[in-house]
């Protein structure tokens, strides 16, 4: 906090109360825009999946992920009133840190664990050597 | 509480120095940042659970798959409940800004109702799955599914308890400064749960039935 800001605060006896309200100021317009956008961004992915619009699985995953990211941004801006100014930018900074951390954790986990089952015993052995079979064990 | 002014001794010779602040230099509304940091740490819990689900989500152990189990109509209704509860909480916050105690309580009650509907439907879904034999013990996929969705449901449950307690507080003391601060925190918590639910319905339910 800068010195100028501090003197401004010190001028009040109870600077917590001086604007009579806590937290970011919200408006009906903001909530309405956020709500309409979220309804649209929720309805489209559900429709895409329920009506089986996209045949290719990978394309569908990408499109659904895109909708989710956009909707999360909408919620952040219109419902959680996120911007670069509140709390001197620390809220945004901690969010960016979390997003980076979450991205590394999830993408890293999926990347590392992708071949987890590669060296495991196959569920349906196609060419299992019969010589190694234990007595009483039948191949399916 | 914030009187840090130096106590003059018996001699009274010491004047307040420039470096002795008359008020604690806490930033405007530091609670919001502190609570936000808590939510971000909660976000990391969900990240770990999402990552676990991402790894185990296809390990069906020859059991039922997501496509066989999930009822998307039910999930869509549940999503609608949570989204509606988000906007009604917004209305409560707008009433709070006007200092309207009755309006705030009314919209909080509506929010609680939608939250309860969400929770009821989710518990119905869980009961239905378990009845079908799709218990958390059935496969790694179901373990990860119940842990992720259950943790979110648990958050909603505690949010509801908080909501009821706060309604009692507001009813008793009105919209005092402390209650406004609590309302702000709960609103952040509630909207945050909605954000997590976006991830759940997209990555678990929608991608699960593809």
Image (cartoon, coloured by chain):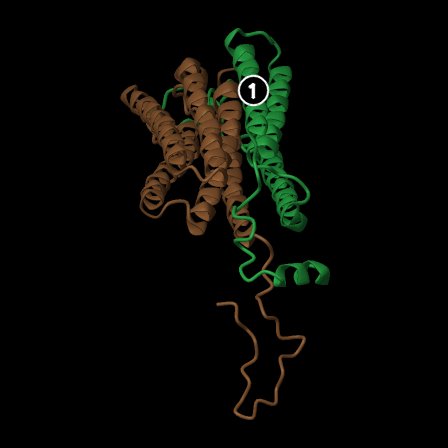
Could you say whether the residue bearing mark 1 is in a helix, strand or loop? helix
The residue tagged 1 is A36
Give the camera-side residue of A134 and A27.
A27
Q: Tell me, what hue is chain B?
A: brown
Residue A77 picture location, percent across and down: 61, 33
Position above or below: B25 against B66: below
Chain letter corresponding to the colour green? A
Q: Chain of mark 1?
A: A
Q: Residue at x 63, y 46 (%)?
A: A86
Q: Residue at x 54, y 82 (%)?
A: B7
Q: How many marks?
A: 1
Mark 1 neighbour density, 10 Å: few (under 14) some (14–19) many (20 or more): few
Q: Residue at x 43, y 28 (%)?
A: B85
Residue B161 picture location, percent across and down: 33, 40
Position above or below: B72 against A69: above
Residue B210 picture location, percent across and down: 53, 15
């Amino acid at each position: 906090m800068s010195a100028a800001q501090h003197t401004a605060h010190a001028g009040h006896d109870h600077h917590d109360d001086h604007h009579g309200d806590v937290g970011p100021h919200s408006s009906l317009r903001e909530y309405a825009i956020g709500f309409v956008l979220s309804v649209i961004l929720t309805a489209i992915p559900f429709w895409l999946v329920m009506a089986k619009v996209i045949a290719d699985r990978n394309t569908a995953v990408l499109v659904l992920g895109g909708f989710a990211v956009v909707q999360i941004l909408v919620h952040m801006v219109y419902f959680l009133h996120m911007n670069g100014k509140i709390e001197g930018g620390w809220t945004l900074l901690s969010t960016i840190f979390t997003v980076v951390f979450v991205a590394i954790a999830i993408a890293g986990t999926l990347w590392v664990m992708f071949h987890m089952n590669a060296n495991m015993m196959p569920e349906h052995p196609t060419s299992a050597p019969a010589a190694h079979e234990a007595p009483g064990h039948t191949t399916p | 509480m914030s009187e840090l002014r130096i106590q003059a001794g018996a001699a009274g010779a010491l004047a307040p120095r420039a470096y002795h602040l008359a008020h604690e230099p806490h930033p405007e509304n530091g609670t919001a940042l502190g609570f936000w940091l808590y939510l971000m740490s909660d976000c990391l819990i969900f990240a770990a659970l999402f990552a676990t689900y991402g790894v185990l989500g296809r390990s069906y152990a020859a059991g039922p798959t997501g496509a066989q189990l999930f009822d998307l109509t039910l999930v869509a209704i549940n999503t609608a409940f949570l989204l509606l509860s988000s906007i009604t909480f917004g209305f409560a916050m707008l009433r709070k800004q006007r200092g309207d105690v009755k309006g705030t309580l009314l919209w909080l009650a509506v929010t609680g109702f939608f939250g309860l509907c969400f929770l009821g439907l989710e518990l119905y879904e869980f009961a239905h799955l378990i009845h079908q034999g799709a218990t958390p013990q059935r496969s790694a996929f179901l373990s990860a599914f119940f842990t992720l969705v259950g943790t979110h449901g648990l958050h909603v449950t505690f949010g509801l308890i908080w909501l009821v307690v706060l309604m009692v507080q507001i009813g008793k003391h009105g919209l005092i400064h402390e209650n406004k601060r609590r309302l702000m925190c709960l609103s952040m918590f509630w909207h945050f749960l909605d954000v997590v639910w976006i991830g759940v319905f997209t990555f678990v339910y929608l991608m699960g039935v593809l």
